[in-house]
Amino acid sequence: METMRSAWLTARRRVIRQLLESMIHEGVIDKAGIETVGSLAVGQTSEWRIPGAKRDGQPVTYRFQARTASGFGRIRITSPITRTEKEANGLLSGQSGQQEALSVAELLSELLSDEQGSGTAERLALFLKELEHTTENDSFHPKRSAAESVLRDGQTLSDGEALTSTGHPYHPSYKSRIGFTLEDHVDYAPEFAPAFPIFWTAVHRAFAEAHTISELHYDALVENIVSSERKQEWEAAIQTSGLSPADYVFIPVHPWQWSNKIRVEAASLIVRNIVVPLGPGTDFFQPLQSIRTLANVTCPRKPNVKLSLQIMNTSALRIIGSHHIRNAAVISEWLHEIWRSDDFLREQCRVIILREIAGAALNYEQLPHPLNTLLGGSMSAVFRESLEPLIDPGDQAVPYTYVTHLTGSGLPAIDSWLKEYGAEAWARRLLEVTLQPLLHLLYAYGIGLESHGQNMVLILRNGWPVRIALRDLPGGVRCLDDSDRFRFAGRPMLPELAVKPGDDRHPILTGNAHDVRDFWMDALMHIQLHEVSLFIEQFGVREEQFWSFAAQEVHAYQKLFPLQRESFELFDLGAPSIMVGQLTARKIWGDGPEREHEVPNPLSRRLKELETTANKEACSTHGALG
């Protein structure tokens, strides 16, 4: 019982920390009303006091210690958060009047004003539900020993995904998974490393769609995944039922999704043989960090499969819309064409871009409107290349989040690598292999990738970073709509893409260069590299140094490609501020174009200093030559 309470308390503290940090960062809590004691200088820790009010109007104060970060105007809460009540006479209530704040509902109620909370009762209730489920689900996660928490030689990327499935480092409902029971977590959550077969169905071609890259046929892909023997067995079973196998498309379904969604809500399609249940395949799959993407552990070289999952996790319901099914292979092929024709990406950076080679789904548009709405996005599959056959012998692939992973004993998983190579050298190399290919895609082609930790894989040799792999790309691309500007770099024309129903915006194109830059910096720097910058301080590399190293990588790229100066100015990575998403504000007030806020850019001053130094050196050289 005590162990369970300790695990719950640890999870609850993290939920409340991330909730309060994000509410302050996004301006949900008015900073003008916050009192601080101590220095707010970068790297310094001070006491923060946030005033609130109980339902009866009596004042309360939330207190904690927080460190001012160098990046993006963020803070990191470093102590438990306490709550102090005062009675009407001004005296502290209770014996001490101060207790640790453990009630999320109380915190939201007391720190959001009546005006802020008006009209948001249902959204707040749902958000509260997600936060409560996050606490429960995270505390249910088993605590591994130190030995079990470090990847060993011979272990795969899937093993690393199980170790590092700790959830979003900023979003407070980082492990909500509304829809899963605790038993479902054991059966299907990545941190438990379960292995299970995928459930397969046959969908009549009049109600199905499948799309692939140009060199691939969908039926051949299915045969490769399930084996020709199993495919023939299923075709024979369909034939025995009086149906023609040629009339059907084989589509996989997550086993949880089949049992909890499709089997019941698509029953009218099943009895009419529009959807024919086939049963489990022979290969076993393990969930990756994204929970709905599964890696084949029977044959790791076979494709990963992303399947619709009717659960709410962090910001979204984890289903897959028709537009994603139709666009996945098209965008992947377009990006791959860029990679294949670019020596810098392919030969120098050696970046790996994992293509989504196929997508298949029930064609929801062919269903009656109520059923279309009920089932929309719930029976879709995307097939992605496996990383296993693409890395060199002797190299090790780890989730990018492994960089900030702690073992069961609290020791950084990267500890031995940094001790061997030196923390500064290792951090610089990490930034080099991460930033150079992403900068090239941005500057040379106008493409910003949503490169957060879940979408990147770090590839090492003997603990030394050598390159990265990028994945889950078709849903995380923003591109400047100016093909003439990037024609010199050979950016191919983007094929026509499907749009999201009810949304007339282009899936990836925008006419605003700063939108591309902000999208790129938000995921990569504001979220992922921010966590790395704080984590690596324990090895003696200060956060400010880390951002200086990042700026040096940008400057190094610009020196390497001076002819791209117009792009450097267009995307302006040295701007004083950028716009980033308000993830918590969206949960409280709903989504919308206004759910972004302006934050200071840690690269700004550092890039200007590097440019000033470079200009002085150029002038000195010119003067000496003159």
Image (cartoon, grey):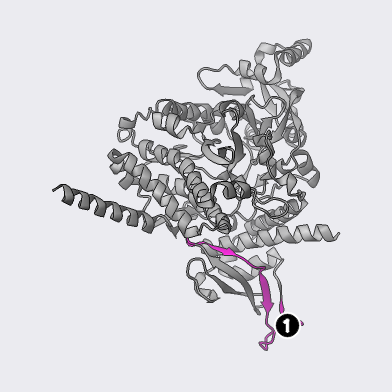
Callout 1 crowding tier (Cα within 10 Å): few <14, some 14–19, many ≥20: some
- Asked if residue 14 shows in the view, the reply is yes
Q: Between residues 34 and 537, which one lies in front from this camera angle? A: 537
Residue at horizontal 54%, vertical 65%? 24
Residue 105 against residue 449 in the figure, above or below? below
- Asked if residue 179 shows in the view, the reply is no
Instruction: Look at the image and say whether residue 482 sits in the magenta stretch.
Output: no
Read off the residue under disc 1. Answer: 93
Q: Position of residue 350 (x, y in %)?
A: 47, 32
Q: Is residue 251 left or right of residue 503?
A: right
Give the secondary structure at mark 1. Answer: loop
Instruction: Look at the image and say whether residue 81 sits in the magenta stretch.
Output: yes
Residue at horizontal 76%, vertical 81%? 94
Q: Is residue 354 left or right of residue 61?
A: left
Q: Position of residue 427 (x, y in %)?
A: 51, 49
Q: Between residues 358 and 533, which one lies in front from this camera angle? A: 533
Secondary structure mainly formed by the magenta segment: loop
Magenta stretch in the rendered image? 70-98
Q: Farthest bottom residue?
A: 89
Q: Position of residue 575 (x, y in %)?
A: 36, 54
Q: Which quadrant of the view contains residue 189? A: top right
Residue 291 against residue 51 in the figure, above or below? above
Q: Between residues 309 and 412, which one lies in front from this camera angle? A: 412
Q: Farthest right residue?
A: 1
Residue at horizontal 50%, vertical 53%? 526
Q: Position of residue 302 (x, y in %)?
A: 64, 24
Q: Between residues 59 and 40, which one lies in front from this camera angle? A: 40
In which quadrant will I find the N terminus?
Answer: bottom right
Which three-letter amino acid code belongs to the residue tagged 1? Answer: Ser
